[in-house]
């Protein structure tokens, strides 16, 4: 990504939401984009997916994936890339899964949208995708509806759907925020394991520097639409340069910290 600026049109005036953002991500790496709500991290992910609202647009910069500049790409060319080259999982899977279709129907449909296989082949691929994300009894889960699964299980389904076609880039937008701590760790471990197995590059959108420490190879810290820090995760945690980064790190709970302050 080179010099990305994303702006909203407000009463005829363009107001920047993301300004001059640049970073590099290699195959097989996990890059975290960290910051509070309103920092521009989710807008960046929507720009990459070509899913910006009608009044928001990329006004300058480049987003190059496997030699293709996604910035300004028409929908007719962007649609075939979603799922096949670039995929995304969201914070709350119930907003992404169709409540009136079975898990199997939705997975098979996603596969057949990009791969001209038979229904039987798509079903077999869907079962394999569920098995890959460690869902027990995948054949039985194929016939279940989203409301019959736990939150962690639904998120695993979304990961299976996103990775079914082996995209070059997976964007995970706050994928564990709605989950309890135990399930959060399981999902993060799963993402990391699948990334190692498939070589897919991952952009992890998060406000939680604890998640960054556990998962990411490198990190971009954003504040008010701008990049304020970038580096490998060990570098940023050991010697943060920006005051905002230090504040984010100070917000990470530490075992025993409360007891020490009380003493």
Image (spheres, rainbow, N blue to C red):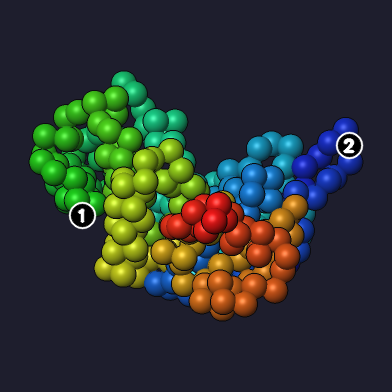
Disc sitting over residue 203 in the figure: none
Residue at 31% from the left image edge and 40% from the top image edge: 152
Residue at 70% from the left image edge and 74% from the top image edge: 241
19 on left or right of 213 = right
> Is 161 placed above or below 251 here?
above
Q: Are marks 1 and 2 in contact (CB under 8 Å)?
A: no
Residue reaching furthest to the top:
100
67 on left or right of 190 = right
Residue at 85% from the left image edge and 45% from the top image edge: 14
**Front residue of this view, candidates 251 and 223:** 251
Where residue 261 sits in the image (x, y, percent)?
Answer: 57, 56
N-terminal label among 1 and 2:
2
Q: Quadrant of the C terminus?
A: bottom right
Instruction: Name the secondary structure under disc 1.
Output: helix
Instruction: Name the secondary structure under disc 2.
Output: loop
Disc sitting over residue 132 in the figure: 1
Q: Quadrant of the N terminus?
A: bottom right
**Front residue of this view, candidates 25 and 168:** 25
Q: CA distance from mark 1 to mark 2?
A: 48 Å
260 on left or right of 117 = right
**Front residue of this view, candidates 16 and 73:** 16
Residue 133 visible at all: yes
Closer to us: mark 1 or mark 2? 1
Residue 109 visible at all: no
Q: Label 2: which residue?
A: 12
Where residue 85 sits in the image (x, y, percent)?
Answer: 43, 59
Where residue 60 sits in the image (x, y, percent)?
Answer: 76, 59
11 on left or right of 38 = right
Q: Mark 2: few, some, or many residues within 10 Å (few <14, many ≥20)?
A: few
Q: Mark 1: few, some, or many residues within 10 Å (few <14, many ≥20)?
A: some
Where residue 114 sits in the image (x, y, percent)?
Answer: 35, 49
> Is 226 placed above or below 119 here?
below
């Amino acid at each position: 990504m080179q010099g990305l600026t994303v702006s909203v049109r407000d009463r005829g005036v363009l107001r920047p939401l993301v300004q001059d953002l640049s970073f590099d991500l290699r195959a097989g790496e996990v890059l975290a984009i960290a910051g509070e709500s309103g920092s521009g991290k989710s807008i960046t992910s929507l720009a990459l997916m070509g899913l910006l609202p009608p009044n928001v647009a990329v006004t300058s910069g480049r987003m190059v994936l496997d030699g293709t500049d996604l910035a300004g790409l028409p929908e007719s060319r962007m649609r075939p890339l979603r799922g096949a080259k670039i995929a995304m999982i969201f914070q709350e899977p119930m907003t992404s899964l169709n409540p009136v279709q079975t898990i199997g129907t939705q997975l098979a449909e996603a596969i057949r949208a990009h791969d001209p296989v038979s229904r039987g082949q798509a079903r077999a691929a869907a079962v394999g995708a569920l098995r890959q994300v460690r869902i027990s009894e995948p054949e039985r889960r194929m016939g279940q509806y989203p409301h019959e699964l736990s939150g962690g299980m639904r998120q695993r389904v979304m990961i299976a759907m996103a990775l079914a076609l082996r995209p070059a880039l997976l964007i995970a937008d706050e994928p564990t925020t709605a989950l309890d701590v135990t399930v959060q760790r399981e999902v993060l471990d799963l993402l990391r394991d699948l990334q190692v197995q498939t070589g897919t590059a991952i952009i992890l959108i998060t406000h939680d520097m604890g998640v960054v420490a556990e998962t990411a190879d490198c990190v971009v810290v954003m504040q008010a639409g701008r990049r304020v820090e970038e580096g490998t995760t060990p570098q940023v945690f050991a010697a943060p340069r920006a005051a905002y980064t230090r504040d984010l790190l100070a917000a990470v709970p530490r075992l025993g910290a409360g007891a020490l302050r009380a003493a």
